[in-house]
Image (cartoon, rainbow, N blue to C red):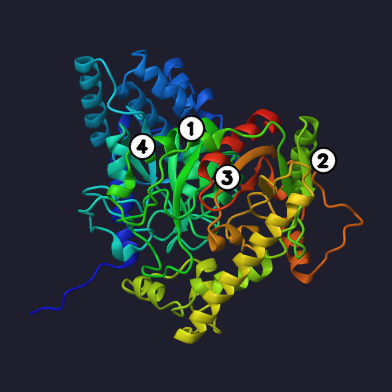
Amino acid sequence: MGEVVQDSWQDIAVRKQAERASKIPAEWIIPNSLLPAQDDEFVQDFPTKSGLFTDRELTITESTASEVVAKIAAGEWTALEVTKAVCKRTSIAQQLINCVTEIYFDQAYTRAAELDNFFRREGRTVGPLHGLPISLKDQFNLDGVDSTIGYASWAGKPIAEESTLVKLLRDAGAVFYVKTNVPTTLMMGESVNNLFGRTLNPRNRNLTTGGSSGGESALVTFRGSFIGVGTDIGGSIRHPASYTGLYALRPAHGRVSYQQVTNTFLGQEAVRSCAGPMARSPEDIRLFMSALVARKPWLYDPQIVPLPWRTDEEILPERLCFGFGMGDGFVTPSPPLRRAMDITKAKLIGAGHQVIDFIPYETKEATDIIIKMWTADGGEEIRRDAGATGEPLPTNVDRLLGSGNPSLKPMTVLETWQNQHAKSLLAQRFLERWQKTAVQTGTGRPIDALITPSVPFPAIRHETQYKWNYGVLSPLLDLTTGVFPVTKVDLEKDRVPADWQPISEKDKEVMDLYEKPENHENALVGLALIGRRLEEEKITALLKVMKDVVGVDY
């Protein structure tokens, strides 16, 4: 018998990319005469300026998810025309910013036509998401489709068991049409892999859209998706959303099903990855969450907390008090993030709300704890899966979990227990400090939420290493966290002050990374809104406050 020759990872990548390209209809291929030059950085406005879209297609794709489901329910739009418009815009997005992994258009058209037939026959919708196209991060499983999470060795192995979340959203009326790009392993702040390549930011193609849900953030901000489903174990929903002007929610574990989702760190449960929505409005976040909870997901996933959508928790006091976390006492925000914080504070105070300082000093200790959790196996799982085809890990993954981290070694069981106990003690101290703010707020309550940057910098250039991450507290302590947009990088206002002094060596590293606003031109800037565990209703309502009071200035 001859030896079986395994395809190289390069051959697998060529095959997967050709398969993806073949699923874009010929009539949606951008003509060479209209294709932006490679050095054209800003392509966000291409759909409106290219002449490739009808006015109706633009109206549909520029609408929010809440507007779309209302139009379909009123019989003004059909599910099929909405789906085709979104698939067309997604096809254009893929050619410009490389945000897609798997194309599912034909199945989407069949599903949309079935929904339209039901509506015509029954005179009603099947559920609150009737006809709404929803995009999925690559790791969510669709029947008959690969879930590679960027590994060449996982290509050509279509999934048979769909994610529970997929089934629940479909039951509510959703239409699935595409899956989006991620970094290999999911453990990196930029969405790039050997299989599908690098996702670009449509407002500046020299910049990242973040990771690991960077394909989702790119597609949603380009208006190729109304709602995208991402996941987050260290910032993977929050960072991409803050880089691209989106509203988003990282729910606490137990509100959104993660069952039958392709993942890294299987069996690691000391810090949990959570799935959540990325969208263009807080109303869309509410639509997604309330529609999902209405399906009673706890009947299908034993990890789900049996909580209905609590409308009483959405009723907010007239006067709110927010904690204000300008940095973490170890690293200060870069000028665009500081300005976004100042804008938010001024507008909240102007609307009659209270803002008090609450610096999350716990971030530095949380970073040490969570990195130990991510690396507890010494990188064995990731080296195994990348090694199956000999593909190299992305540089920034290799620095954490590969040969680029020579000090990496597995933790002992005792060391793991000690680290998890340190997490429990930190959670207790953080809660106690939060509760003590009741004496400062003037409302008789502790702070209603904490406003802070998710990362110290706006969207960064490709292959740039994250120097610091404010976002580790939310997954480590399982805190419900939203994201809201505020502003964009300003080339005049966002220069580093001449008299700026670092408060630590790491602070200097971060500001050196930022350097100047020209490195981040046109990048959007958002902030995080942190609540307590299982406060999804409240945080969603507070995102609406941010939209109404703070708004955006671009």
Are the residues at dot 3 and dot 4 in contact (C-beta closer than 8 Å)? no
Q: How crowded is mark 1: few (under 14 residues within 10 Å), some or many (20 or more)?
A: many
Is 316 in front, or is 459?
316
Dot 3 or dot 4: first in sequence order is 4
Q: Distance between the residues labelled 2 and 1?
A: 34 Å
Residue occupying image coordinates x 61% and y 63%: 465
Dot 2 or dot 4: first in sequence order is 4
* Residue position marked by numbered label 3 in the rendering: 482
Q: Distance between the residues labelled 2 and 4?
A: 48 Å
The answer to whether 354 is drawn above or below residue 81 in the figure is below
Q: Which amino acid does label 2 sit on?
A: Glu
Q: How far apart are marks 3 and 2 (CA)?
A: 29 Å
Task: Tell me the element at label 3.
Answer: strand
Dot 3 or dot 2: first in sequence order is 3
Q: Choose mark 2 or mark 1, whichever is in front.
A: 1
* Residue position marked by numbered label 2 in the rendering: 492
Q: Which amino acid does label 3 sit on?
A: Gly
Q: Is residue 315 left or right of residue 255?
A: right
Q: How crowded is mark 2: few (under 14 residues within 10 Å), some or many (20 or more)?
A: few
- Residue 162 visible? The answer is yes
Specify the label residue 294 is tagged with.
4
Are the residues at dot 3 and dot 2 in contact (C-beta closer than 8 Å)? no
Residue ranking furthest to the right: 499
